[in-house]
Amino acid sequence: MADLETRIAQGRGDAPADLVLRGGQVFDLMTGEMLQGDVAICGDTIVGIMGSYEGVEVVDVTGLTLVPGFIDTHLHIESSLVTPFEFDRCVTPRGVTTAICDPHEIANVIGAAGVQYFQAASERCLMDIRVQLSSCVPSTHMETAGAELTAQDIKGLMGHRSQIGLAEFMNYPGVIHRDPAAMAKIALFEGGHIDGHCPLLSGKDLNAYIAAGIRTEHEATSVEEAREKLRKGMRVLIREGSVSKDLEALAPLLTPLTSPYLCLCTDDRNPLDIAEHGHLDYMIRRLIELGVEPVAAYRAASLSAAEAFGLKDRGMIAPGKRADIVAINSLAGCHAQIVWAAGRRVTEEAFAARDIMEPVGRRSVHAPHLEAASFRTRANREQTDVIGIREGQILTDHLLEDIPIVAGDKAPDVTRDLIRITIIERHGKNGNIASGFVRGFGLKAGAIASTVCHDHHNIACVGVNYDDMALAANRLSQIEGGFVVVKDGEVLAELPLPVAGLMSLNCFEDVRDSLTALRRAAKSLGVTLEEPFLQLAFLALPVIPALKITDRGMVDVTKFEIIS
């Protein structure tokens, strides 16, 4: 009761507040007004606004605008390529004070231990990391993952204080066709929060999916798709990742009228994009540039996000709310000058004081040794299924091309941008190797390989030279996973990711610099994609239409079956 009474006393001004922010203006997301007066904070809670307060500590924020901390409503921290601790250090200074993550990337490699690592890390970071429980490990039956999470496994992970609910249910056919395993997982969270994932789903199938109790969804790529989901009661999360860039397409839908039901997320965003452009701060700036009213953009980034996920203690600068506050230069600029997370000022000293844990998932790459011949394709017909890349989306096209069979092999053809893509099982389960073709990289020489390969995280390799492909894939085993670019028998650039083959042990600045070198090396091979590495990773995700590839072969996602 002492804490309760202290908060009341400080809010009333009967006692000095622990912290007072003085001289700034508060952007009120309820009315859209600019409010004058001090902001009083007791511990981790805002206790007063619109008044004059005395404080044990007073910070002058004259000339700055105070907005609530930003909430990323759906992301995979692993895709930042750094540990949760480095992710915290990377984006919290930009104003992201809450991250609702799904650790299904690491869970697909090492199972429940990966989820538990994130749960434990959430207790030690400055930002509030909320760890959803991964629903689809593996995402489908058409791939070989390193681990599996059954309903019983998920039940054993429930109850941690970081949990909100069940993470994105990617196996939407399993939901609408009432697969028993899917039903068992959903039943665990009935009445609670279940996050969705249903690209291009509409009509009665969408009705059935939402009827399962699924409340939020981030895969809408057009206004029409997003509007149908809104009309049917879903909260739509506008996504802007390193590959999936849906902000410009969905911006016209974000208005003061719809903003209570729209949120922002990044899904998968790497440190290079964060350094060059930003995180949620970039999304807010860009939305306002596109004509979205500031109150709608800032609501989507905080208050609407808090309401959508049941986080009633945050999302506004108001008494009783968690003291997640960002002091920015201007609404249009959205450049964080000072950030407080739960009343604690975000500084390098605060980061240094955290209790950093030892990483998990070391030595996770157990792939077979590859030779040049491993990348040949055997076929008896020239007509060939080809994955067509859509830059800026993870949706792909299902193309058909005639490719001649020469000496028992269909070879890459750079003149037609028909490039070999191969997936190699790397968890030591079966040694599967599956090859196909992809168009859209622009590759003219060499090879690129990666263990970041959604969601099973086997080795994905694209190339036009089989010897280079073998070198790139084998190099990943030597460095415990990561990214490699090879040309003419030489490794041009690499980034080791020894934490489950997904995350670096280095600081985000070093990872950013390595990504710069990797991008430069990829362009030297002729690659035209802005982000070739994560684009490659999504070519192996068999829950995103229309054509993908896993270690078991080419997958027709529309039919939800492996092409024989």
Image (spheres, helix red, strand yellow):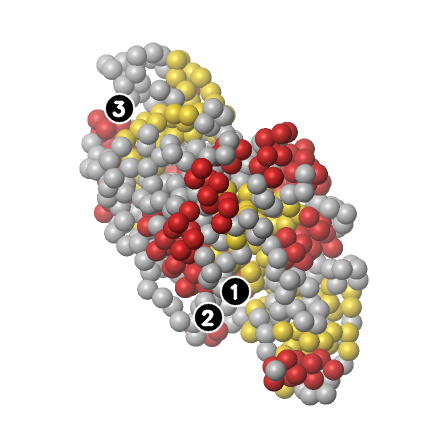
Question: Disc 2 vs disc 1: which is toward the camera?
Answer: 1
- Horizontally, is 139 left or right of 214 in the view? left
What residue does disc 3 label? 376
Spot occupied by residue 108 in the image (x, y as percentages of width and height): 37, 46
Q: Are marks 2 and 1 in contact (CB under 8 Å)?
A: no
- Label 2 neighbourhood size at 10 Å, few (<14), some (14-19), many (20+)? some
Instruction: In this rendered view, identify the residue nearer to me: 265 or 521.
Output: 265
Say which element carries label 3. loop
What residue does disc 1 label? 127
Residue in view at x 71 percent, y 69 percent: 318
Spot occupied by residue 369 in the image (x, y as percentages of width and height): 20, 37
Say which element carries label 2. helix
Q: Is residue 494 visible?
A: no
Q: Is residue 216 visible?
A: yes
Q: Amino acid at mark 2?
A: Phe
Say which element carries label 1. loop
- Label 3 neighbourhood size at 10 Å, few (<14), some (14-19), many (20+)? some
Tell which circle, 2 or 1, labels the residue nearer the N-terminal end: 1
